[in-house]
């Protein structure tokens, strides 16, 4: 069953076409990778799904319902969250608070109730803290609960972003270059985390990634973008041997030498 | 009602144009700095004001030495405006050095730079107030009158709908000097090496610095030019309107910023156009609001009018009339 | 502050010694206020004890109780024996009013990261809403009702002022908060000026605000038949509301809404991606911040018994901003300190220095030009403070600290929750 369907998605900035006519079907509970050289339009694609950019034409369907015209926060309420290529944490908030912000859409605490110190709201806050702590344990940050997010090391920041996105209990999680800047050990940890997300939390994962080893290892299905166009899609083995993909990455002529 | 509006139109055009070119030149200072640093330089209105006062001081000094009677007024004027322009230009460079560069180095949030610029604006206002009050006992200064010969434009005999209009000789001076300033700036930005460097830095500071452009120096030059133009306009303002006080820069600054936004912030030609348009609109409102609203609102609402334009433009067309929409990189 | 705490560390390692020293300090300054003929310095030092209290190593509840006792009982009682009783209480009232306002602006600037340069407009709205109806002014345009309303309605108007200001906050916010961050500063500045100009000119065609004449003879509040007219009485009203405001701010700061504000401040795009509605969250900051200001406006109008537009200029807006920056953006104790410092500087220190300078010049023939009078140098002084703090101490006098959670407790609770879940699943499997 397809959880996400993308139909003829096109985005133009002025005269520049960032993506054109992208079609994509993402199966529920799968790990899908979107790859392509720099400037291929991958992040633009993510930005359209999360409503940061409004597509010029085309449609995005989540479980058959169109997401076009929604605001970014509404898309998040529909169950799609993401991480960012250039990490976007709440730097002056603690690590725990960052995760708690991720929970907000499931936290029904009106501020008037907070002021009146209603017992059920206090209880909810306490429970949220414990849940957030559990998530931090999950992503391996339980020792940095009270640290400001901006002070964390790079790899830890990436994991915190994933933790924050997890806290929203998404149906689909978009990871934008999650392994960028990570060392092999950290990447392995990330790989296990992504597997876990799928198997234990039933999250459908779409990721943009340049680390081909990682992509080939974990993806069920791969889409390849180049210059804003979908040039190939298929299982990892099919992509590995696709001449157009190799051309896109290495330039024409690379195939003959191979 | 329409007759009344039409009758006054020639005078409104003259007054609006005078005010408009003043806005235009001050607006350029805002737009240049914003184009390069993405910073609203709140102190710029006060640089304009400081220019007016420096001009007044130089003028009084020259008068004391008897130059005013010995030399043609035009020469005296040129000396005054050049000195004021250089002094405020240097002031602008100094402000950038002291208040903005350290923040840039620290990569501080924009909010902080805005706050320092408010602080600078306060300090300038009070320093000028202090000096003026110390010297003259009053911070409101009346400039010696120059170029006050009145001309009568006889529009009525040509087109009978219109009333006649009058203007002072200084109006011509303001118009000519600002046009000269605007044209030379436009040439400078579009035709010279420095102008190109400026545009490059405005486009992308990091890349520009990789292309061996000394970004800090370009920023200094930008501040110098913007502030010098602002200061020179201060002198024009003093000669045109006669009295100045340390607080003229505040409201005028906001309006000039409005003009910059109207023309599309970062766009120099847009700022010129926005300034003239705002000046005309404001004078039109001042002359006709009371007639249009049947006395409910008078000329005192002309500032409200300008602010409402600012708010409307920012909400509905934040890129201005001539700017391009910017997309934030995610 | 660091030298102060260093001193304390040296003198008082133990909690007991700290408390003894603190009590001695309060007694000493209190005695000074009681005995000295010109006791301004003693009065200020006594107020300073609150700051010392903040740094004492005792539990939070004890600090709160001591602080309230000092401010609500000790200070007014001792000051009442001084010749300048009403002046001191006036300063105290102003500090209370501006603390609450600064805390309101702190929500907007410090928590939500929105630079509002027209904040005083909400204060004006609150002040005029009481002024119009508690004076004869309302009868000039209202088709029904008898005005002035009696002083008993003052208490109701505190809430009305808050609500009206909040509505203005929303009315301003709805269009304006869509504007990019740095433009917001100038738009709010414009809005502040619009409100001031309107207040100054709305005497025609319908006389609503009495224009530049201002509104005079505003009814004093009535408290169970007692007419409240003196600063010493207003002091308690301002203090009471100030306590309410602190409670609200502290509760909100660590709530869902407070976290949403900070998330929007730190990264708008990420906040949206986490499901936080941008405009609604910013609007809440605007409205709640404005409501504090509106409440205090009502008190201000009642205290002055006269309002006109000159009290609500751009300078006043930036003064509140100075309080926030000086104290530390986002830091509640910092902002309170900032407000107190600015008000005391403006009303006490600068005027006293000015007076001192003028006596110097008349007694010793040292001529000090009136242009130099520190009272007139406010713009320069506060401008410099803004620059210095923005450049060198961005976090202010008392930097904001995120509330730390008890990790051990969380660990325990997390383990308990896990056990409970296990039990539930295994229990479920059995049945």
Image (cartoon, coloured by chain):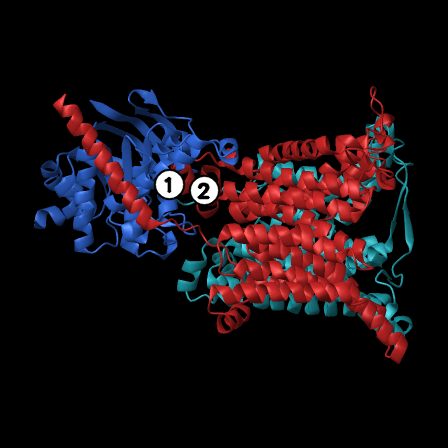
> Label 2 vs label 1: CA separation?
8 Å
Is residue C373 positioned above or below B182 on the image? below
Q: Nearer the viewer, residue A152 or B214?
A: A152
Q: Nearer the viewer, residue C95 or C381?
A: C95
- Labelled pair 2, 1 in contact (Cβ < 8 Å): yes
Is residue B33 in view? no
Q: Quadrant of the C terminus of chain C?
A: top left
Chain to which mark 1 belongs: A
Local crowd at mark 2 within 10 Å, few (<14), some, or many (≥20)?
many
Q: Position of residue A202 (x, y in %)?
A: 21, 31
Query: The chain shown in cyan is which?
Result: B
Q: Tell me the quarter of the picture where residue C275 sits.
A: top left
Residue that mark 1 sits on: A100
Query: The chain shown in red is which?
Result: C
What kind of element bears circle 1?
Answer: helix
Instruction: Specify the label residue C259 is tagged with.
Output: 2
Query: The chain shown in blue is which?
Result: A
Local crowd at mark 1 within 10 Å, few (<14), some, or many (≥20)?
many
Is residue B86 in view? yes
| Residue at the image position 86 percent from the left and 79 percent from the top | C366
Is residue A238 positioned above or below C398 on the image? above
Q: Quadrant of the N terminus of chain C?
A: bottom right
> Looking at the image, which residue sits at the far left?
A258
Chain to which mark 2 belongs: C
């Amino acid at each position: 069953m397809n959880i996400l369907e993308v139909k003829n998605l096109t985005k133009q900035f002025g005269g520049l076409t960032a993506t054109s006519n992208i079609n994509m079907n993402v199966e529920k509970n799968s790990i899908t990778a979107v790859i392509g050289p720099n400037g291929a339009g991958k992040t633009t694609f993510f930005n359209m799904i999360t409503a940061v950019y409004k597509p010029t034409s085309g449609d995005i369907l989540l479980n058959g319902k169109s997401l076009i015209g929604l605001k970014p926060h509404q898309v998040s309420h529909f169950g799609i969250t993401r991480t960012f290529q250039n990490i976007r944490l709440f730097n002056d908030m603690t690590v725990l608070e960052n995760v708690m912000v991720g929970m907000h859409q499931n936290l029904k605490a009106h501020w008037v109730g907070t002021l009146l110190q209603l017992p059920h709201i206090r209880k909810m806050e306490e429970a949220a803290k414990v849940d957030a702590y559990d998530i931090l344990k999950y992503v391996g940050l339980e020792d940095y609960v009270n640290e400001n997010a901006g002070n964390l090391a790079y790899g830890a920041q990436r994991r915190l972003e994933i933790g924050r996105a997890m806290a929203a209990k998404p149906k689909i999680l978009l990871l934008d270059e999650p392994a960028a800047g990570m060392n092999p050990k950290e990447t392995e940890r990330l790989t296990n985390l992504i597997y876990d997300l799928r198997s234990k939390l039933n999250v459908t994962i779409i990721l943009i990634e340049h680390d081909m080893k990682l992509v080939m290892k974990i993806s069920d299905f791969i889409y390849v973008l180049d210059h804003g166009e979908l040039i190939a899609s298929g299982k990892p083995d099919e992509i590995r041997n696709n001449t157009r993909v190799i051309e896109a990455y290495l330039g024409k002529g690379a195939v003959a030498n191979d | 009602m329409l007759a009344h509006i039409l009758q006054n139109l020639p005078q409104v055009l003259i007054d609006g144009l005078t005010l408009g070119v003043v806005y235009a030149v001050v607006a350029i200072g805002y737009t240049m700095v914003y184009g390069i640093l993405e910073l609203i330089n709140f102190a710029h209105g006060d640089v304009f004001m400081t220019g007016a006062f420096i001009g007044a001081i130089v003028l009084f000094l020259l008068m004391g030495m008897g130059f005013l009677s010995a030399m043609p007024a035009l020469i005296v004027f040129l000396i005054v405006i050049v000195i004021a322009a250089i002094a405020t230009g240097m002031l602008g460079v100094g402000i950038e050095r002291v208040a903005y560069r350290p923040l840039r180095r620290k990569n501080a949030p924009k909010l902080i730079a805005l706050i320092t610029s408010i602080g600078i604006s306060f300090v300038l206002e009070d320093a000028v107030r202090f000096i003026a009050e110390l010297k003259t006992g009053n911070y409101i200064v009346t400039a010696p009158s120059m170029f006050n010969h009145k001309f009568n434009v006889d529009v009525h005999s040509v087109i009978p709908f219109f009333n006649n209009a009058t203007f002072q000789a200084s109006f011509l001076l303001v118009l000519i000097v600002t046009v000269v300033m605007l044209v030379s700036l436009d040439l400078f930005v579009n035709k010279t090496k420095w102008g190109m460097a400026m545009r490059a830095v405005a486009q992308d500071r990091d890349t520009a610095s990789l292309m061996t452009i000394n970004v800090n120096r370009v920023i200094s030059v930008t501040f110098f030019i913007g502030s010098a133009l602002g200061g020179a306009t201060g002198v024009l303002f003093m000669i045109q309107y006669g009295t100045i006080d340390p607080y003229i820069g505040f409201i005028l600054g906001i309006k000039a910023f409005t003009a910059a936004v109207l023309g599309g912030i970062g766009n120099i030609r847009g700022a010129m156009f926005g300034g003239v348009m705002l000046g005309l609109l404001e004078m039109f409102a001042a002359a006709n609001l009371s007639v249009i609203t049947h006395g409910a609102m008078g000329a005192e609402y002309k500032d409200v009018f300008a602010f409402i334009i600012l708010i409307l433009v920012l909400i509905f067309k934040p890129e201005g009339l001539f700017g391009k929409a910017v997309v934030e990189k995610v | 502050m660091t030298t102060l705490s260093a001193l304390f560390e040296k003198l008082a390692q133990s909690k007991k010694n700290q408390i003894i020293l603190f009590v001695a300090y309060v007694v000493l300054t209190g005695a000074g206020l009681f005995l000295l003929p010109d006791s301004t310095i003693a009065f200020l030092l006594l107020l300073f004890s609150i700051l010392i209290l903040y740094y004492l190593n005792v539990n939070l509840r004890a600090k709160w109780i001591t602080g309230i006792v000092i401010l609500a009982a000790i200070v007014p009682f001792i000051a009442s024996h001084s010749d300048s009783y009403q002046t001191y209480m006036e300063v105290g009232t102003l500090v209370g009013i501006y603390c609450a306002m600064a805390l309101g602006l702190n929500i907007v600037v410090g928590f939500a990261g929105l630079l509002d340069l027209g904040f005083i407009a909400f204060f004006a709205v609150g002040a005029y809403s009481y002024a119009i109806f508690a004076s004869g002014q309302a009868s000039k345009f209202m088709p029904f009702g008898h005005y002035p309303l009696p002083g008993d309605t003052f208490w109701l108007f505190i809430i009305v002022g808050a609500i009206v200001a909040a509505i203005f906050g929303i009315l301003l916010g709805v269009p304006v908060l869509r504007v990019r961050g740095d433009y917001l500063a100038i738009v709010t500045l414009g809005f502040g000026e619009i409100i001031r100009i309107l207040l100054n000119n709305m005497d025609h065609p319908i006389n609503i605000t009495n224009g530049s004449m201002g509104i005079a003879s505003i009814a004093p509040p009535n408290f169970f038949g007692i007419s409240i007219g003196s600063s010493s009485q207003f002091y308690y009203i301002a203090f009471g509301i100030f306590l309410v405001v602190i409670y609200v701010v502290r509760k909100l700061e660590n709530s869902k809404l407070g976290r949403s504000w900070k998330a929007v401040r730190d990264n708008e795009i990420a906040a949206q991606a986490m499901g936080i509605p941008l405009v609604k969250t910013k609007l809440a900051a605007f409205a709640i911040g404005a409501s504090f200001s509106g409440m205090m406006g009502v008190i201000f109008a009642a205290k002055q018994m006269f309002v006109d537009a000159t009290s609500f200029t751009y300078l006043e807006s930036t003064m509140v901003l100075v309080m926030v920056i000086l104290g530390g953006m986002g830091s509640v104790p910092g902002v309170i300190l900032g407000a107190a410092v600015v008000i005391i500087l403006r009303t006490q220190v600068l005027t006293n220095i000015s007076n001192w300078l003028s006596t110097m010049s008349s007694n010793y023939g040292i001529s000090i030009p009136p242009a130099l009078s520190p009272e007139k140098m406010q713009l320069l002084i506060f401008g410099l403070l803004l620059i210095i703090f923005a450049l060198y101490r961005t976090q202010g006098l008392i930097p904001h600290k995120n509330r730390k959670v008890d990790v051990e407790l969380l660990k325990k609770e997390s383990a308990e929750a896990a056990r409970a879940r296990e039990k539930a699943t295994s229990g479920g499997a059995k049945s």
